[in-house]
Each structure stands twice: as C-alpha cells, then as structure tokens.
Amino acid sequence: MRIDILTVVPELLASPLNESIIKRACDKGLAEIMVHNIRDWAEEKHRQVDDYPFGGEAGMVLKPEPVFRCIEELKGQRPYDEVIYTSPDGEVYNQQHANRLSTLENIIILCGHYKGLDHRIREHLITREISIGDYVLTGGELAAAVIADSIIRIIPGAIGDEASALTDSFQDGLLAPPVYTRPAEFNGWRVPDVLLSGNFAEIEKWRESQALARTRELRPDLLEE
Ligand code: ADE
C-alpha cells in the first residue's frame, strides 16, 4: 500500500517511519510512505502556507490553495481510498480502524496544523477525520506517524513472525497475555511452570485465561464492547 503524508514539518516524520519494522516493510516493497512538504505547493514568493483567520481569532490557519494543489496533483497520479485529516476533533482511532485501513491501496494523511485549517479543505477534500486520543498535540504529525505505523505493521509479511501481529493486544478484543524469556528464574521469581511444560494445549489455555483476566482487571470496558 502507499501512504502519502502531507505536512508543513516533514522533519518530524523522518525518523519514526524510517527505522525498524516499518523501514523493513518499506524496503521489502510491502508499503511506500511518501512525505510531502505542503510548502512545495505554495505559489507565493514567501512560500506562505498559513494566514490569519477571518474574524480575528488568534493563531494561524492553513491556507486552502497549497493543500488543494497538492492533493489534486496526487489524485491525478492514482486513485485514493481515503483522505484522512489528523485532528483532536476526529473519530478516536482504534485497532479496527487500523485493520480496515491496512486493506486499502492508497491513502493520504493530511497532518493537522496549529489553529486548524481552512474549513473548505475539510468539507471538500477530507473523507475521514481521526484523533489518536482525547488530548491535544502541537500538530498532527505524530498522529500521522502513529496511524501509518499501526497500519503497516499488520500488512502480511511486515512482521517476521506473522502470527505475532495476530496475537497483539486488541487484535481479538483482549489484552495480550504476559510473555517471559530466559532465565526461567530471575531474582527468585520463576516463570509460570506451564510455559516450561512443553504442553502446547495447556499453554494455549493458560494464555487465553491470562488474556481474559488481564482484560477484566485493566480494561473491563473492552469486555463490555
Ligand atoms: N492533532 C492534535 N492533537 C491531535 C490528536 N489528539 N489526534 C490527532 N491529531 C491531533
């Protein structure tokens, strides 16, 4: 899949999407992330992308022209399934959204901007507004990185051991069970015996009961859903 991210601060996206699993998925050709600087579509001499809001509020608002030019150019090159805007006003993002987005071919993510963007962009270009939680960030770039990361890691082949993406917390509506590695005893604390038993049916039963118990204790709201 291809993800085009539009921002006025491309530097913020360079490192989170250029390391580890996401980088390897891109290197393998499973995903392509293109980060675009909206300023490159600003025509004015000073490459100005924002301006004072009508009505005299404080803060700067992203101008419509460079965003329309950029998105229309991209749409002329390939069809897009979604044009997402990252904003605290949006639908609160969860694993089901990530699962659905990971099945799409091409998406655009427009990063939110200080005081917001000209409402005509939201009315005429954006197909979905996403918030990554009920708190306010300085801009939508980190939210875009979170969304891109969560989508790409579940594309088949992105994680070496494919089963491990499916056993994540939330993938079946439950938190993941605890995991342990060597040594079997550390500081006098032993790994649960069942994990050392070699009895895979028992291990699976233990994992399921732990997932349920942890969800009941830490996130009972998930069970209500
Ligand atoms: N921009 C600022 N805050 C945000 C949030 N919580 N989610 C998505 N985009 C944002």
Image (cartoon, rainbow, N blue to C red):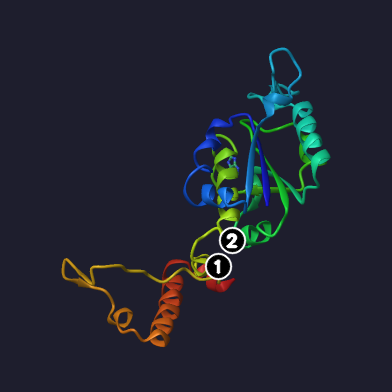
Would you identify the image quadrant in which residue 124 lies?
A: top right
Camera sees residue 66 = yes
Q: Is 210 or 201 nearer to us in this picture? A: 201
Q: For mark 2, does the 10 Å Cα neighbourhood hold few (<14), some (14 to 19), or many (20 or more) residues?
A: some
Residue 164 pos. (x, y %): 49, 67
Residue depicted at x 53% and y 50%: 22
Vertical comparison of 68 with 175: above or below = above
Q: Is 74 or 100 nearer to us in this picture? A: 74
Residue 107 pos. (x, y %): 71, 48
Residue 85 pos. (x, y %): 69, 43
Residue depicted at x 69% and y 23%: 49
Element class at badge 2: helix
Camera sees residue 120 = no
> Of label 2 and label 1, which has the lower sequence position?
2
Would you identify the image quadrant in which residue 157 lies?
A: bottom right
Residue depicted at x 56% and y 54%: 150
Q: CA distance from mark 2 to mark 1?
A: 7 Å
Ligand 1, what quadrant? Answer: top right
On screen, residue 165 versus residue 200, left or right, reads: right
Dot 1 amino acid type: Gln
Q: Which residue is mark 2?
A: 95
User: Which quarter of the figure is the C terminus placed in?
Assistant: bottom right
Q: Which residue is mark 1?
A: 171
Dot 2 amino acid type: Gln
Residue 135 pos. (x, y %): 54, 45
Q: For mark 1, does the 10 Å Cα neighbourhood hold few (<14), some (14 to 19), or many (20 or more) residues?
A: some
Residue depicted at x 59% and y 50%: 147
Is there a contact, CB below 8 Å, between mark 2 and mark 1? yes
Number of the label disc, if any, that sits on residue 159: none
Residue found at the very far left of the displayed protein: 188
